[in-house]
Image (spheres, rainbow, N blue to C red):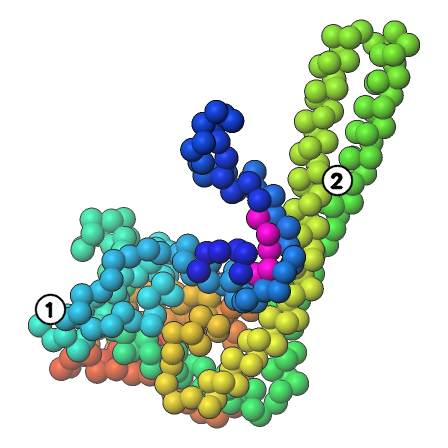
Amino acid sequence: MSQQEYCGDVINFKTCSKSFKNKTRLPNDPENWAIFKDVHEPIIARGDFEKVQTLIAKTKRRAPKAKNGEKSIFCDLLFCGDCHGKLRHHTNTINKDIHYFVCANNKVDYRGECPGRHYVRADAIEQVVMLELRRMAEFLAADEEAFAELLAQKTDKELLKEKKHDEAELQKAIVRNDTVAQLYEKLYEDNAIGKVSDEWFMQLSHKYETERLELKTKIKTLRQKLSKCGQREQERENFTSAIRRFMRMDRLTAPLLRELIDHIDVFETEGKGKNRTQRIVIYYLFVGYVEIPEISHRPNIVADTRKGVATKYLTEPKTA
């Protein structure tokens, strides 16, 4: 799951030794690795590998107790809308069929800083997500061109702004790198003919060399970021393909959710009795929150949580 070689890469210097006399191999820092990409035929696609690494890095937890059933497919996707902490998955101690989430930073259960529990049942989350995905699927089926244009607007606006900034920074870094090289060359010539003392030469040459290495790293990073901009079109196509697969499914699955959803913000319940509302906002991968045009009238989910109490779930972000 974490072997980068499966992507077709060759990695050298993953281990090192303190001395040639000591045969014990020690793990080397990743920054000292020598990575050669696309050397051999990959076993898995690089995009899939990077996606898995992101999921692995999010959370490491103990396996759920068998008596509490399987882990919810929404684990690691739900976040508190107020403190932005994760929501923890729980099972009701009396009724094992009831699964719910609460803010991991709330004052009531964990002595945290978040004032509310942000309690939400897992089945309610599933209904809300199903409803929103059905709305999106209906929009895609009704007008594919408008759907593609909506995704392009959501991604291209931020992408264009970021791309312009990175291109400007890259150009400045390249110009400065050339200038430093010229200054270093002139400094060497001045030292050779005696205009600059050896002491000054050592100090300035060290300064220029340090700056040159920093610029080299910066240029490499910016070029990598700009090269990734071209992947956005493929990401939009993958997102649309995932929506099409959802149209052929009758239930949600964890892999599908990971392809579509970046995270879900859950806010504290407001109101009392039958007038309770709770805001659940879905942020999709690559595009963030999407305001879906109403193709067919689908009312918001209303759940009767217990006798005399009902909660209506809203899916629009809070307005300032």
Residue 250 horizontal/vertical position (percent): 38, 89
Looking at this rendering, what residue extends furthest in the right direction? 193
Q: Quadrant of the N terminus?
A: bottom left
Residue 162 shows up from this direction: no
Q: Which amino acid does label 1 sit on?
A: Thr
Closer to the camera, 260 or 201? 201
Q: Name the residue: 46% across, 85% down.
A: 246
Q: Does residue 205 lie above or below 234 as drawn?
A: above
Task: Please give the range of residues in magenta.
Answer: 7-11
- Element type where label 1 sits in the image: loop
Q: Mark 2 points at which residue?
A: 173
Q: Name the residue: 37% across, 85% down.
A: 251
Q: Residues within 10 Å of mark 1 (few under 14, many from 20)?
A: few
Q: Which mark, residue 93?
A: 1
The Cα atoms of the two marked residues, 2 and 1, are separated by: 59 Å
Q: Name the residue: 17% across, 69% down.
A: 66
Q: Does the magenta portion include 170?
A: no
Q: Does residue 200 lie above or below 82 as drawn?
A: above
